[in-house]
């Protein structure tokens, strides 16, 4: 892989110019989102995610961007999210957790900020939270069995599961009328306090995600079982949210 981007803002001018060259007037906006748009960004390990918003004509011709996408992926930039403004406005009820996260943590790089002023319906958000929590619980149980309880394999599952859990915590805090902190660790602690969860379980998972844990295999397996218990507890309380 090529040289990593240490500061996402440093590539804004060049990546904007290249997408403008490719799409011209069909480029509506470029938006940075995810870890790279917040204080938890870690060069070389955090993804750099861009949303490329196109006109209806432009979205039909995204093949024009193949060379630009490939070039920046070699620099460590993730595969961009290509969509239209109409797609966003007509899918708010389907992906409210995702749009809530995008709206609260993004940087407008170019053009119109289509995420500004989005209206997330509370009931749609609650329903997706319930679906995600109960679905994630099933998947984690299956993953535990599939891994045979082996710590090394469970670490990979934990790394993959934690971003979705953080997004769920933020959505649940929003439903409670509470502002979600910017940093992941503080999100965990705030959500744990609000919903009676063991913050230590999820903070230990975060340490594994960030490569800061020296937990042995037996300890990881025990942590995973504790995570399942906390998710079961959260699943039992989700119906009370309005």
Image (cartoon, rainbow, N blue to C red):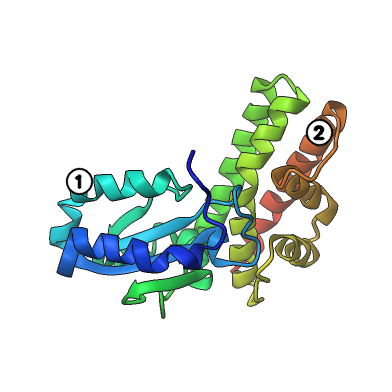
Q: Position of residue 176 (x, y in %)?
A: 65, 73
Figure check: 61 above or below 96:
above
Residue at image coords 68%, 39%: 158
Q: Position of residue 62 (x, y in %)?
A: 21, 50
Foreground tag (2 vs 1): 1
Residue at image coords 75%, 60%: 185
Q: Residue furthest left?
A: 57
Label 2 crowd (10 A; few <14 / some 14-19 / many >=20)? many
Which residue has dot 1 on it? 63
> In the image, which disc is placed on residue 190?
none
Q: Is residue 158 left or right of residue 80?
A: right
Q: Residue furthest bottom?
A: 117
Residue at image coords 74%, 40%: 228
Disc 2 or 1, which lies upstream in sequence?
Answer: 1
**Residue 214 appears in the figure:** yes
Tell me how far mark 2 sits from mark 1, CA to CA.
43 Å
Residue at image coords 51%, 47%: 3
**Quadrant of the frame with the C terminus:** bottom right
**Residue 78 vs residue 219, the one in the foreground:** 78
Q: Residue furthest top?
A: 148
Classify residue 29 by image quadrant. bottom left
**Residue 135 vs residue 80, the one in the foreground:** 80
Figure check: 101 above or below 45:
below
Q: Secondary structure at mark 1?
A: helix
Which residue has dot 2 on it? 220
Q: Position of residue 120 (x, y in %)?
A: 45, 71
**Residue 26 vs residue 139, the one in the foreground:** 26
């Amino acid at each position: 892989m090529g040289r990593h981007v240490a500061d996402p803002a440093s590539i804004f001018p060049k990546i904007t110019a290249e997408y403008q060259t490719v799409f011209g007037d069909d480029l509506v906006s470029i938006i940075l989102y995810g870890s790279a748009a917040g204080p938890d960004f870690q060069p070389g390990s955090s993804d750099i995610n861009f949303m490329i918003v196109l006109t209806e004509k432009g979205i039909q011709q995204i093949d024009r961007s193949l060379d630009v996408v490939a070039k920046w992926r070699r620099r460590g930039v993730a595969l961009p999210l290509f969509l239209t403004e109409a797609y966003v406005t007509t899918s708010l009820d389907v992906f409210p957790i995702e749009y809530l996260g995008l709206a609260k943590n993004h940087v407008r790089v170019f053009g119109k900020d289509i995420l500004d002023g989005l209206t997330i319906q509370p009931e749609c958000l609650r329903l997706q939270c319930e679906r995600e929590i109960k679905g994630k619980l099933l998947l984690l149980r299956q993953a535990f069995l599939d891994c045979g309880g082996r710590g090394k394999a469970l670490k990979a599952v934990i790394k993959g599961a934690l971003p979705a859990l953080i997004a769920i915590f933020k959505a649940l805090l929003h439903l409670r009328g509470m502002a979600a902190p910017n940093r992941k660790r503080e999100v965990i602690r705030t959500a744990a306090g609000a919903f009676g969860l063991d913050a230590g379980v999820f903070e230990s998972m975060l340490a594994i995600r960030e490569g800061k844990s020296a937990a042995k295999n037996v300890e990881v397996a025990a942590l995973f079982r504790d995570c399942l218990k906390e998710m079961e507890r959260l699943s039992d309380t989700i119906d009370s949210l309005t």
